[in-house]
Image (cartoon, rainbow, N blue to C red):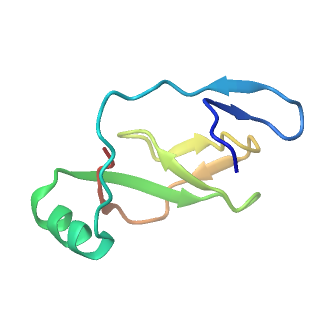
Amino acid sequence: MRNSNVLKCGYCGFENPIAESQQDIVELDFRSKLAQLATSAEPLDGLTVKCQAGAAEVAMPESVTAHACPFCGSNVVATATSRELIKPR
């Protein structure tokens, strides 16, 4: 695998440039970092439902219980429960 600064679609050839980061990249131990984030990080509270037509998981906008699936366009009605997730950085 060669170094690259673009993501290239294997189907249409579209290239999406990747911005260079000035931050140092540090490898983290997954299990210890996950445990730390579970107690210290600000959680994301969101409602995710499964589209019955296409089986995609759809994140519902805040205060919305019915929405069109962004993938197939079918109607999605919230019948799931809210869950707390760790906010990515």
Instruction: Name the quarter where the C terminus is drawn.
Output: top left
Judge left or right: residue 74 versus residue 35: right
Query: Residue at the left extreme?
Result: 40
Residue 8 x, y percent position in the rendering:
75, 34
State which quadrant residue 9 falls in: top right
Whether 63 is drawn above or below 26: the answer is above
Please tell me which residue is depicted at 28% across the width and 76% down the height of the picture: 31
State which quadrant residue 33 falls in: bottom left
Judge left or right: residue 72 versus residue 21: right
Whether 67 is drawn above or below 31: the answer is above
Please tell me which residue is depicted at 38% across the width and 66% down the height of the picture: 81
Whether 66 is drawn above or below 51: the answer is above
Of residue 44 and residue 53, the one placed in the foreground of this image is 44
Residue 73 x, y percent position in the rendering:
74, 40
Judge left or right: residue 32 versus residue 56: left
Of residue 18 and residue 46, the one placed in the foreground of this image is 18
Of residue 10 and residue 51, the one placed in the foreground of this image is 10
Please tell me which residue is depicted at 70% across the width and 62% down the height of the picture: 55
Residue 42 x, y percent position in the rendering:
17, 50
Please tell me which residue is depicted at 28% across the width and 53% down the height of the picture: 45
Query: Residue at the bottom extreme?
Result: 31
Of residue 64 and residue 41, the one placed in the foreground of this image is 41
